[in-house]
Image (tube, rainbow, N blue to C red):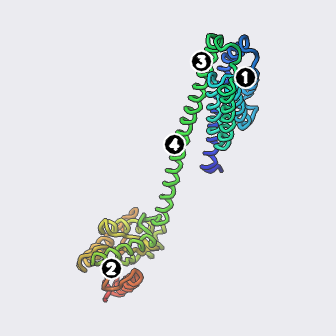
Amino acid sequence: MKTPRDEIQERILTLKENAVSRLIKGVFLLGLIAVPLSVSRALYTGWLPAYTVHISALCFFAVMYFLPNKLPIQFRVWSILIFSALIGGIGILNYGAVGNGMMWAMFSLIIGLFFISNRAALITGCILLTVFAFSLYRFVFLGYGFPGSADLYVASFASWATTLFGSIMFVVLIAVTITEHRQEMDELLLKLSEQNQTIEEQKQHIEYQANHDALTGLPTLRLANDRLEMALKLAKRQDTKAALLFLDLDGFKAINDNYGHDCGDHILKNCAERISAEIRESDTACRIGGDEFLVVLSQIESDKDITQLCERLVSSIKQPINYGSHNLFVTVSIGASVYPSHGDGSENLRRSADQAMYQAKKSGKNNYHISIA
């Protein structure tokens, strides 16, 4: 199975292959016009090494153009880099700053940066800079003469046309390279963003499942413990009270045994909804397993608030629950412990609430009991 990383790497490789194919196509088609014009200058300059390189490059690009899927991507990229650097270097040596050598030198640097590596571009740049320095020395300090007649070169249609098509070729190829890369990278970044969003959603879903009961949707004991710690810290900071209720359903096992687990699940979900309906948004109800629930209460103003809530919970849960053609009944036994009266930590409060719940069961169930300090 492919990972998102593998898919992105394949997408990047496809991006490079598409861009290189377009570059080869552009060089070949424009070269069909530019190379004959360039070679025609031999009439007044004599045959120069640049013309041999131009013809060789055109032939080689023709091979790559007609055999696009036969040559590896790295071979094609290095071929573009080498030939463009050769054309740039020889153009600088023959014509100095007058011809298209500088543009092709820049193009080779861009090819190296975009498709190979910074190191390849740096080496290419150093070589071309050395060629430029040598050409500068020859033309400026040694008085090297321009090949052929300089006046004839400047007045020649071929020289102007070659410069024009060379410039067009350079601009088109650079535009294609940058535009295609930008478009493909935008799509790649969008896909990566969507994958990250999916991963984040999956992470949140997994985290939700880890912290919530699958049946009732209530938080689990793990999340309830975190909420209880937060409630205790808030109570200490604001000098208020917090409370913990331990709820255990009465008669649930008999219903589960007589009517089946589906019915038992229906009862649990219904009781969870009733518990959630009676507490505040700032409070937390959770199912800790079986038919047992905890309720974390924060910022309690008085013990009367706890008493009233316990009475509402007892009254609400004992109401009949419809299941098919049956009206089923369960009740609840509630034990309550209050911070700081019944403990200064979560473990102490949990123990006190548990003991208070058993006291409520001993007193006849369907009742509540608040722990004694």
Q: What residue sits right under mark 4 in the picture? A: 190
Task: Confirm whether residue 292 shows in the render.
Answer: yes
Residue lying farthest to the bottom in this orientation: 373
- Depth check, mark 4 against mark 3: the one in front is 3
The amino acid type found where label 3 is placed reads Leu
Q: Distance between the residues labelled 4 and 1?
A: 44 Å
Q: How far apart are marks 2 and 1 (CA)?
A: 101 Å
- In the rendered structure, the answer to whether residue 276 lies left or right of residue 102 reads left
Decide which of tag 2 and tag 1 comes sooner along the chain: 1
Give 11 or 44, whichever is nearer the viewer: 44
Decide which of tag 2 and tag 4 comes sooner along the chain: 4
Give 357 or 351, whichever is nearer the viewer: 351
Q: Callout 4: helix, strand or loop? A: helix
Decide which of tag 4 and tag 3 comes sooner along the chain: 3
Q: Image point 65% across, 13% down: which residue? A: 153
Q: Callout 1: helix, strand or loop? A: helix
Tell me the quarter of the image containing the C terminus: bottom left
Q: Image point 75% across, 20% down: which residue? A: 48
Decide which of tag 4 and tag 1 comes sooner along the chain: 1
Q: Distance between the residues labelled 3 and 2?
A: 96 Å
The numbered mark at residue 50 is: 1
Q: Distance between the residues labelled 2 and 4?
A: 58 Å
Say above or below: 152 vs 371.
above
- In the rendered structure, the answer to whether residue 192 lies left or right of residue 71 reads left
Q: What residue sits right under mark 2 in the picture? A: 366
The numbered mark at residue 152 is: none
The amino acid type found where label 4 is placed reads Leu
10 Å neighbourhood of mark 4: few (<14), some, or many (≥20)? Answer: few
Q: Image point 53% across, 48% down: which residue? A: 195
Q: What residue sits right under mark 3 in the picture? A: 164
